[in-house]
Amino acid sequence: MKTTRIRFALAFLATAASAAAPVAAQQAAIPDHPDKLVFAPIVYTPPSAKDYRVVLKNGMVVYIAEDPTLPLVNIELTLRTGSYLEPAGKEGLAAFTGSQIRRGGTRSLTAEQLDEKLDLLAANVSTGIGETSGRASLNALRDNLDESLKVFVEMLKEPRFQEDRLALAKEQALQEMKKRNDDSEEVEAREWNVLLYGEDHFSNRFTTAASVQSISRPDLASFHKKYVHPANMIAAVSGSFSRPEMIRKLEAAFANWPGPAATVPPVPSEIHTAVPGIYRIQKDVNQGRVSIGLPSVRRGDPDAYALEVMNEILGGSGFTSRIMKTVRSDEGLAYSAGSGLRFGVYYPGSFRAEFQSKSRTVAYAAQLVLQEIKGMREKPVTDEELDTIKRNLIETFPSTFGSKAQTVGIFAADEYTRRDPTYWQTYRDRIRAVTAADVQRVAQKYLTPEKMVVLVVGDQKEIDLGDGKHQTSLEALAEGRKVVVLPLRDSLTMKRP
């Protein structure tokens, strides 16, 4: 018996020792600092649009994906329309048409009945029209889909545009107009777009009191009839359903739509040459808002990938970016500071560095941002900066297609804007190929100091006083560019005094 116990003990110790050996080896292999961790490369193949694309019998393109995660169905329609199609003097017509499709009732339902019906169905419906596209969305319970889809399509096909709802919307718009100059951020965004693209650009055709008052129910009905039609729609559909069954439902729902679709004119692509200078707008606020930049390139430009990496290093990556480190972390001059790069679809996009700082430190903070822009041109970025940003862009890429709704939404948007179908398959390889020399080259090509537009919105007298520690001013930063004082526009006419 004693011998048996001894043998058992020895066997147990041997087993424990053999089990502990791999654990000890694993512990020895664990690096002593997170920087030394090594991860296997992420293997990810992006989805292909053709696997989700369906064309209905009426010609309507649908991107469709089953997703049983929740008992819901999402339908997102993109409409080929936009405010660029508004007649002169009817600015605001597209927006009113878009909102009143949902808010103004249907052929068989008053506005109030439509609201009640959707509430009973627990269906979330929204519509709207922006500058270059419209949208209509339905989020419905799977069990209520048939009735929800019926109401949704009737609303799109035969909106009532109820007079009292339109009158209320117009009155609300007029009241909102009166507040246009209250928020310095709104003023900055509005005037920045004008400086980059010009007063005559369609995106700068402002709604006025006169244009709102001129809009009538027949105007909405006419605009709707011209542009809201299945031939001008692209759908993204996802949720808990059978794909063949959903296609049959969509075929039935969007069949027999009265009237042909109008040929939609293309979005204007005219190019405006921004006039360099420092532009100042007076607002009695204790912090100044500053934007620094110039027009950039369109989507699809060969330099787009190097520009994306350049912007991330300069100001687009939060606390790892140069502008944020300098202006916030080192100097404590702003809570948020950085830059953004937008690639235009129909006309050139823009590069914009921006921050908000105390009035007395605005000039110094602007000087620092301009120095960082200059630094991108003068010296190559470091290997560490380049590697960090490229890895971030590549390794976060799969999240672009994080859900079925995101996936079909992206493909529908790509079809609408006619993006190169190989873009998603080649994106990471193109980012990997960007070198430090490429980053410096595009910085030198596009971040031209003498072409920069600088917009400063704030208390100009306080800004001119400076912080008393740094010998700089907005005039000094102009370096030969003109300095222009822009009066605030009248909020109802959008004219300057």
Image (cartoon, helix red, strand yellow):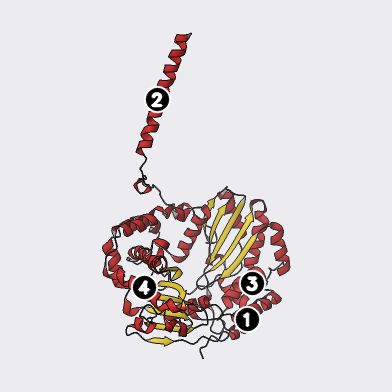
Quick one: label 2 or label 1, which is nearer the N terminus? 2
Q: Is 58 above or below relative to 31?
A: below
User: How far is mark 3 from mark 1, CA to CA?
Assistant: 16 Å
The residue that label 2 is drawn on is: 17
Q: Secondary structure at mark 2?
A: helix
The residue drawn where x is 32% and y is 77% is: 449
Q: Quadrant of residue 275?
A: bottom left
Residue farthest to the top? Answer: 1
Crowd tier of the residue under label 2, counting other residues whose Cα lies within 10 Å: few below 14, some 14–19, many 20 or above: few
The residue that label 4 is drawn on is: 368
Foreground: 235 or 27? 27
The picture places residue 160, in percent across and down from the top left corner, at 68, 71
User: How far is mark 4 from mark 3, CA to CA?
Assistant: 47 Å
Kind of residue at disc 3: Gln
The residue that label 3 is drawn on is: 100
The residue drawn where x is 38% and y is 70% is: 298
Q: Secondary structure at mark 1?
A: helix
Q: Secondary structure at mark 3?
A: helix
Kind of residue at disc 4: Leu
Kind of residue at disc 2: Ala
The residue that label 1 is drawn on is: 174
User: How far is mark 2 from mark 3, CA to CA?
Assistant: 76 Å
